[in-house]
Amino acid sequence: MLKVKNLSVHYGLIKAVDDISFHINSGEIVSIVGSNGAGKTSTLNAILNIPRRSGEINFLGYEIERHKTHTLVQKGISLVPEGRRVFANLSIEDNLKMGAFYNADNYEHLKEQMYRLFPRLKQKNNTLARNLSGGEAQMLAISRALMGEPKLLMLDEPSLGLAPKIVGEVFEIIKVLKNEGITILLVEQNAQQALKISDRAYVLENGKIVLEGKGIDLANDDNIRKKYLGI
């Protein structure tokens, strides 16, 4: 589904991502894990053609550099950004409408699907997003991204700032989404949780991929856990 070859991302003289290559097959959960500042978010942004970069990115046969970000969203890539970034002064329902901007004809059907996945949101559908808990805001951010019916869903630090119980709920939701046929690229500092649910994973350190393998193998390797994952 996605092929990334020799990707580098620059911010002025700073190289945030340094010549990395990876791929994602349809139906997989693939994680990119690493410490803060490793280049994880820059990698996600590059897939949506946001920062200055070099290298090749191919999504379902489309060369990313030839398309603007909004076109890539229409073609099936959605990003749930770090920090949720829901529209604080809009209700849950209006946030979902924004997510369906390119899919308005299917809005009612998709909204009911989101309420089935996230019943807590249905109970509060007229609540302003600024009044939601952190977990509820994360559920809203995910559901807003899903309103575009993405083929590839990218999640940037979905567990950040959440209570342990809510973190568990979020990762269960990610597994449900995979079972419903959505391909997922997951960026996480919570490596232990991410690797447990991932088919494959890449460890990013100082902008470079230093390890890759099956998620469960990386999660269970004590040397890897201590050296690269801080576990």
Image (tube, helix red, strand yellow):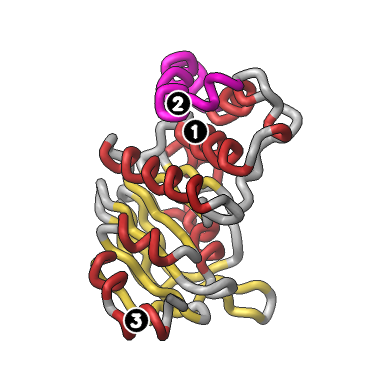
The residue under the point 40% across, 83% down is 226
Residue beneath disc 2: 114
Q: Say whether disc 2 or disc 1 marks the residue closer to the N-terminus.
A: 2
The residue under the point 47% across, 56% down is 47
User: CA separation, marks 3 and 1?
Assistant: 34 Å
Query: At which x and y percent is residue 185?
Result: 39, 54
At mark 3, the secondary structure is helix
The question of residue 113 being in magenta is answered with yes
Query: At which x and y percent is residue 93?
Result: 60, 21
Query: At which x and y percent is residue 222?
Result: 31, 81
Whether 84 is drawn above or below 118: the answer is: below
Q: What span is in magenta?
A: 101-124
Residue beneath disc 3: 224
Contact, mark 2 vs mark 1 (Cβ under 8 Å): yes
The question of residue 36 being in magenta is answered with no
Left or right of residue 136: residue 175? left
Left or right of residue 115: residue 184? left
The residue under the point 61% across, 45% down is 84
Q: Nearer the viewer, mark 3 or mark 2?
A: 3
Residue 23 placement: quadrant = bottom left
Query: At which x and y percent is residue 189?
Result: 50, 65
Residue 123 placement: quadrant = top right
- Magenta span: predominant SS is helix
User: CA separation, marks 2 and 1?
Assistant: 6 Å
Which amino acid, mark 2? Met
Q: Nearer the viewer, mark 3 or mark 1?
A: 3
Contact, mark 3 vs mark 1 (Cβ under 8 Å): no
The residue under the point 54% across, 57% down is 45
Which amino acid, mark 1? Ser
The dot on residue 143 is 1
Identify which residue, 131 or 177, lies in the foreground. Answer: 131
